[in-house]
Amino acid sequence: MNKSIVILGHGGHARVVLDVLRCLGWPVAGFLTPDLAAGTDWLGLPVLGDDTWLQSKKAGDHAYVLGLGLLPHRPTLRAALYHRVRDLGLDTPALIHPSAILARDVHTESGVQIMAGAVIQPGSMIGEDALLNTGCRVDHDCQIGAHAHLAPGAILCGGVRVGEGAFIGAGAVLLPGVQIGEGAQVAAGATVRRNIPPRVRHIPGHTDKPL
Ligand SMILES: CC(C)(COP(=O)(O)OP(=O)(O)OC[C@H]1O[C@@H](n2cnc3c(N)ncnc32)[C@H](O)[C@@H]1OP(=O)(O)O)[C@@H](O)C(=O)NCCC(=O)NCCS
């Protein structure tokens, strides 16, 4: 990476992202956050400003990684921020932890984040800005839509499709070939045996709730 990285956000996911960047040996310029004053030190790096900094002249000197995840109760924030960065023509490199295992033909798009210990098997496609969190497992021929989040330890059997902006909770298991609709959410620990429609929250033992 020849441009130094700016991380958007300063919460728990930002710490994880910073660790990946340090493992990769990529230079990091600092953070953007609305919650801390510019110039504040956080984890040994400066807060550069808030999101308005993206419009400054120096913004193009850097590349950007998102330091916030897609969480069930704020499902659109991450995608909105990603699009803001892209619409400004700024770089959003894929971030892949060195311990992640990707089959040789896995297709990844701009801005994907694949965290420590994830395993992605042949024929799988990972859409723009998708977040595959710690230790998730994606078997052969899965399709992960743009902006989707597979939380830590989620397991996708072969041929699963996860729609754009969907959230798969920690440790959920998706059986072979199931389809998760756009923007749908699967609770942590759920075992999913059937397709889940778009924009509903699926919790075991409960009727799917529209979002
Ligand atoms: C599903 C989830 C989003 C909660 O949704 P919610 O609509 O706010 O649900 P509530 O907390 O109001 O609970 C509603 C019911 O579902 C149950 N429930 C909630 N989460 C559940 C889960 N993961 N598994 C089983 N039941 C669950 C609750 O016990 C409650 O049951 P009740 O009505 O019989 O009392 C949340 O529990 C969850 O699983 N989040 C994912 C967390 C995660 O993976 N984070 C990763 C961060 S990297």
Image: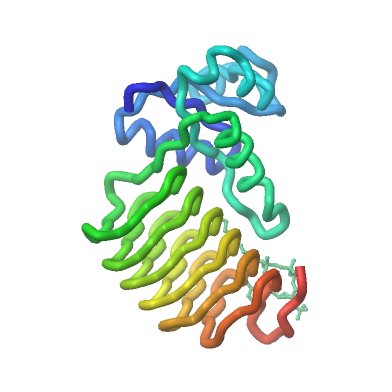
Can residue 206 be spotted in the picture?
A: yes
The image shows residue 82, relative to residue 209, as above or below, that is above
Q: In the orientation shown, which residue stands out farthest toward the left?
A: 104
Q: In the orientation shown, which residue stands out farthest toward the right?
A: 210
Residue 80, given in percent of the width and then of the height, sits at 66, 44
The quarter of the rendered structure image containing the N terminus is top left
Residue 124, given in percent of the width and then of the height, sits at 35, 65
Q: Which of 104 and 23 lies nearest the eye of the viewer? A: 104
| Total numbered labels placed on residues in the image | 0
The image shows residue 129, relative to residue 123, as above or below, that is above
The quarter of the rendered structure image containing the C terminus is bottom right
Can residue 9 be spotted in the picture?
A: no
Residue at 66% x, 77% y is 203
Residue 189, given in percent of the width and then of the height, sits at 54, 74
Q: Is residue 47 left or right of residue 140?
A: right
Residue at 46% x, 67% y is 154
Q: Which of 22 and 181 lies nearest the eye of the viewer? A: 181
Residue 25, given in percent of the width and then of the height, sits at 30, 29
Q: Which quadrant does ligand 1 occupy?
A: bottom right
Colour mode of the rendering: rainbow
Residue at 71% x, 28% y is 35
Residue 9 in which image quadrant: top right
Q: Is residue 192 left or right of residue 2?
A: right
Q: Is residue 2 left or right of residue 50?
A: left
